[in-house]
Image (cartoon, rainbow, N blue to C red):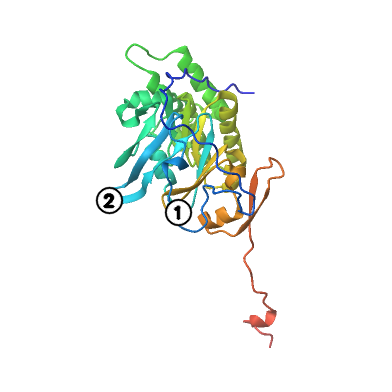
């Protein structure tokens, strides 16, 4: 089995926070009923949330009442979210609900107009970019490689945050690149130009570059884009290995709700820029939640392989037509 990249030493622990972590949301059954109020939506609108509804403090990466958007357009307002340490957190929701915008804010690419993102007890905007890049890696939704660059050279760029005037390319850098390429199955492509690769191959190369960065926190924005079903599962299996075997904290935006339920240890459901439910998939994913968030009538059953929630869409009612409803355009003479 391919040895995964080594986990760098953790930074000093954060000082105690006055906001202790809250226990997980109250489990719900698959029909959407609950014995106590839980963080799930009961209607199309996102419910209001208080600071008691989130895991403020205790985690390395979290937000404090952030308002984020583009120019004068607000996507999310007064948003509090905490990424559980050592979790595989997946953010789901309909298109344009703010998933990728939240991920950009967590990665420092998008500065909140109000509030702040906190990494290791400090406002992320106060931490030098290179230092952030040694703690947090990002695979954006779309990436453009420099023209004429080879696969191995692009993957090697993941080691840039570890370079300095006093520390040039080393055996550790070489090992990190080799291991990342092997883990993503792109070793045989090392001498190829990135421009020559298929969309799926390029996506795996970008993932390899992020792995070579060797950060304890990985943010992945739609990492299965351009991948066929086999490579989607292979990549998510790799992410699961990074989480379970190496202790990485992963945050991914996924469109496939069944993939999210199968791989996530912590699920965040968003709608209209707000978080309407979060917790373990088996605790929060109900038919009611899926219909509230996605507008999709469905049934929830147990995945026969993993036992996690499996969303089965309801069939649309279809009218049964007889042949007489459609006259023959070329009747026999």
Nearer to the camera, 223 or 195:
223
Assign the N terminus to one quadrant of the image. Answer: top right
- Quick one: 261 or 40, which is closer to the camera? 40
81 up-or-down from 71: above or below: above
Query: Looking at the picture, does residue 136 appear above or below residue 74?
Result: above
Sort mark 2 into few (<14), some (14-19) or many (20+) by Cα contacts within 10 Å. Answer: few
Residue at mark 2 to residue at mark 1: CA–CA distance: 22 Å
Local SS, label 2: loop
- Residue at the outermost top position: 166
- Disc 2 target residue: 72
Local secondary structure at mark 1: loop
Query: Which sits in the foreground, 157 or 49?
Result: 49
Q: Residue at x 42, y 34 (%)?
A: 62
Residue 24 percent across, percent down from the top left: 55, 38
- The residue positioned 56% from the left and 24% from the top of the image is 246
State the residue position of label 1: 46
**Residue at the bottom extreme, as displayed:** 333
């Amino acid at each position: 089995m391919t040895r995964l990249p080594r986990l760098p030493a953790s930074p000093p622990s954060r000082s105690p926070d006055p906001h202790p972590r809250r226990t997980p949301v109250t489990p719900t059954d698959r029909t959407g009923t609950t014995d106590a109020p839980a963080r799930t939506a009961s209607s199309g609108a996102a419910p209001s949330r208080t600071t008691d509804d989130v895991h403020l403090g205790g985690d390395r990466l979290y937000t404090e009442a952030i308002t984020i958007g583009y120019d004068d357009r607000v996507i999310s307002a007064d948003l509090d979210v905490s990424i559980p340490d050592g979790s595989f957190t997946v953010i789901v929701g309909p298109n344009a609900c703010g998933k990728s915008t939240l991920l950009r804010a967590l990665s420092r690419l998008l500065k909140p107009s109000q509030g702040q993102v906190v990494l290791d007890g400090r406002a992320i905007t106060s931490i030098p970019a290179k230092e952030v890049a040694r703690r947090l890696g990002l695979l954006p939704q779309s990436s453009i490689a420099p023209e004429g660059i080879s696969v191995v050279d692009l993957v090697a760029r993941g080691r840039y945050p570890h370079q300095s005037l006093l520390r040039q390319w080393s055996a550790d850098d070489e090992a990190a690149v080799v291991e990342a390429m092997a883990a993503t199955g792109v070793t045989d492509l090392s001498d190829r130009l990135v421009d020559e690769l298929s969309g799926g191959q390029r996506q795996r190369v970008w993932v390899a570059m992020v792995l070579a960065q060797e950060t304890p926190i990985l943010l992945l924005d739609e990492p299965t884009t351009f991948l066929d079903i086999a490579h989607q599962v292979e990549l998510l299996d790799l992410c699961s290995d990074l989480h379970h075997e190496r202790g990485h904290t992963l945050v991914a935006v996924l469109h496939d709700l069944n993939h999210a339920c199968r791989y996530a240890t912590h699920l965040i459901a968003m709608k209209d820029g707000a978080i309407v439910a979060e917790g373990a998939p088996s605790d929060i994913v109900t038919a009611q939640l899926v219909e509230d968030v996605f507008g999709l009538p469905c049934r929830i059953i147990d995945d026969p392989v993993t036992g996690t929630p499996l969303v089965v869409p309801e069939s649309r009612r279809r009218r049964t037509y007889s042949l007489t409803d459609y006259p023959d355009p070329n009747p026999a003479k």
